[in-house]
Every structure is written in C-alpha cells, then in structure tokens.
Image (cartoon, grey):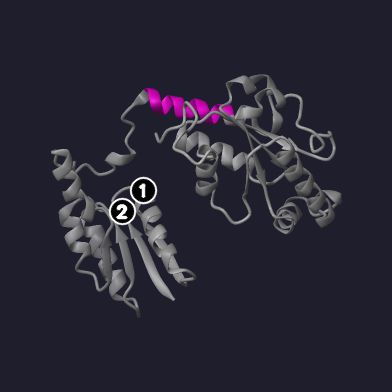
C-alpha cells in the first residue's frame, strides 16, 4: 500500500486534482491518499517532514507550494516530492514575457467580481429549477437535463453551475406522470437544449434502495423499465445522452458541454 500526500499552501484542490489524474494512469494502484492544505510556513513543512520520516515506506508527495523556503524544507523529507507546478512556470514565463506571481492562493482569488456573481446566479438558478420546479423559467436555461430519478441530474446541474456558470435546469422522467412515454410538454419547446442522463439499472437499484428501501420505487424491475423507457425516449427525439454509471461528474459535464464533438459550449459556459 503506497502512501500519497497532496501538500499545498492553500486549499489543496489544484494539487489533488493533478495528483489524482497522474495516479489514475497507473490503473488499479492501491494507495492511501491524504491532503494537507495550508502548509504555508517552514515550521509546518518541518512537521510534515518529521511525519514522513516515521513512515515505514518512502511516501509520494505531490505539492503546489509557492514559497521557495517552504518547498526547500519539504524537499528534505525522505519522500518522493513532486512539484506539479515548477516544470511549467519557466516555459510559461518565457513565452508570456512575465514573471510568475509568488502570491499564495492567487489562482483561487476572486479577480472578476461580475463573473463570480454570474456563477452564484447560475447556482441559484439550478437550485430553483431542480427536479422540475419553476418550469416557467426554462426559457432562461442553457441546458435542461432529463433522466429518471437518481440518475445524477441534481449534482450535475450544480457542478455545471459552480464550475462553468452555466444555467442548468433538470426535469425528472417518471412512470407516474407519463413523462417516460413522451417528452414532457414543459420541456418540448426547448428540445435543442435538452440533454439526457441514463444509468445502469443495477446501479440505479442500489442507489434507490439506499434512499428508500421499501416499496416498488427501488425494485430492480422498475429500474430496468424506467431506464429502458428513458433511453428509448432519448433516441426517439434524437436527444443526446450519457451514461453516468461509472463516469465522474467532471467527465459527465465535459460530455454535456461538448456534445457535438467540437469546442462549442453554451453562451455562459466558462471556467470562472
């Protein structure tokens, strides 16, 4: 079992994403992962070095620490220390003709208040139109996600809103209201903005059973019927859809935004 640490002088989000992406290239690697944020002083780095020294196996350390002094201290550890930023800074600085900033957490700072507010507005839109609510606002939606209950519509809507500032509504397809038989009337005028989510029936059965174990809602038979009906509906109306069973929310979002195979994304879609 490998011990892997993601060490940052800020939140640790960036280095963890990069580190996990690199580790994923090694297949079914067994590793114990730990994130250590806000290691922003030499003293804190020294404490980590002492911790690594007590490990029975040389750990792997991914880091994005900005301070040269703190990073130098971390590099004294009996560990494989990988700076995920350093290989690119010099080449970028040369190409841009600008020296990189040494400010900790600069990537996460709110540099454009209007864009930040736009992202918050997108999150509010996703919440107010969740699960078929306020269908009268669908004209404002850039994407309308449709799919059976527990196929991942709400988390995907919120991720697209938070990460890209995209206005996303979602509508549930159920056996109870006939929405699995034909595209719901409230969604039909916006068919070009509709994107479907599907899921493997066995996985859907597990998810629903955890939420509501009693009754027909979680039965495997119902899950199979609803998934088959939803996918048939998508094909009948030429609605693009993606299987969420084993895909990360980041991959699902990317497939939705670039569903035509090109670089086009909805009007308000952007990294903020």
Question: How many numbered circles does the render carry?
Answer: 2
Q: Nearer the viewer, residue 174 or 12?
A: 174
Q: Separation of disc 1 and disc 2 at Cα?
A: 7 Å
Residue 219, located in which quarter of the rendered image? Answer: bottom right
> Which residue appears farthest toward the bottom when viewing the image?
56
Q: Which residue carries the number 1 mark?
A: 11
Rendering quarter of residue 109:
top left
Checking the image for residue 143, the label placed there is none
**In the picture, which quadrant includes the C terminus?**
top left
Q: Is residue 52 left or right of residue 160?
A: left
Picture coordinates of residue 6, whole percent (x, y): 35, 59
Label 1: how many residues lie within 10 Å, few (<14), some (14-19) or many (20+)? some
Which residue occupies 40% across, 28% down? 116
Residue at the image position 26 percent from the left and 66 percent from the top:
81
The picture places residue 126, in percent across and down from the top left corner, at 58, 31
Q: Is residue 215 left or right of residue 164?
A: right
Q: Quadrant of the N terminus?
A: bottom left
Residue 118 covered by magenta stretch = yes
Dividing the picture into quadrants, the one containing residue 125 is top right
Q: Which residues are magenta?
A: 114-125
User: Would you place residue 181 above or below residue 52 in this image?
Assistant: above
Q: Secondary structure at mark 1?
A: loop
Question: In the image, what residue occupies the spot 50% across and 43% down?
Answer: 254
In the figure, 225 relative to 112: above or below? below
Residue corresponding to mark 2: 8
Residue 200 located left or right of residue 93: right
**Residue 252 screen position, x and y as percent:** 55, 46
Image marks 1 and 2: residues in contact by CB distance under 8 Å: yes
């Amino acid at each position: 079992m490998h011990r892997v640490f993601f060490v940052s002088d800020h939140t640790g989000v960036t280095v963890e994403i990069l580190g996990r992406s690199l580790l994923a290239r090694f297949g079914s690697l067994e590793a114990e992962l730990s994130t250590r944020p806000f290691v922003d002083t030499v003293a804190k780095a020294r404490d980590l070095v002492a911790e690594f020294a007590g490990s029975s196996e040389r750990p792997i350390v991914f880091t994005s620490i900005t301070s040269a002094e703190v990073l130098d201290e971390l590099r004294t550890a009996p560990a494989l220390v990988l700076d995920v930023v350093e290989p690119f800074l010099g080449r970028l600085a040369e190409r841009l003709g600008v020296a990189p900033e040494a400010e900790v957490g600069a990537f996460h700072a709110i540099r454009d208040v209007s864009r930040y507010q736009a992202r918050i507005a997108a999150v509010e839109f996703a919440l107010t139109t969740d699960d078929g609510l306020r269908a009268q606002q669908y004209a404002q939606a850039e994407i309308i996600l449709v799919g059976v209950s527990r196929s991942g519509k709400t988390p995907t809507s919120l991720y697209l809103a938070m990460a890209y500032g995209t206005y996303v509504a979602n509508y549930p397809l159920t056996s109870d209201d006939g929405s699995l038989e034909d595209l719901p009337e409230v969604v039909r005028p916006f068919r070009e903005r509709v994107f479907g989510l599907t899921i493997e029936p066995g996985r859907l059965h597990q998810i629903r059973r955890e939420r509501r174990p009693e009754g027909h809602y979680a039965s495997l038979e119902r899950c199979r019927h609803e998934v088959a009906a939803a996918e048939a509906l998508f094909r009948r109306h030429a609605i693009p859809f993606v299987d969420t069973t084993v895909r990360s929310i980041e991959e699902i979002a990317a497939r939705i935004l670039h569903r035509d195979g090109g670089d086009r994304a909805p009007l308000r879609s952007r990294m903020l």
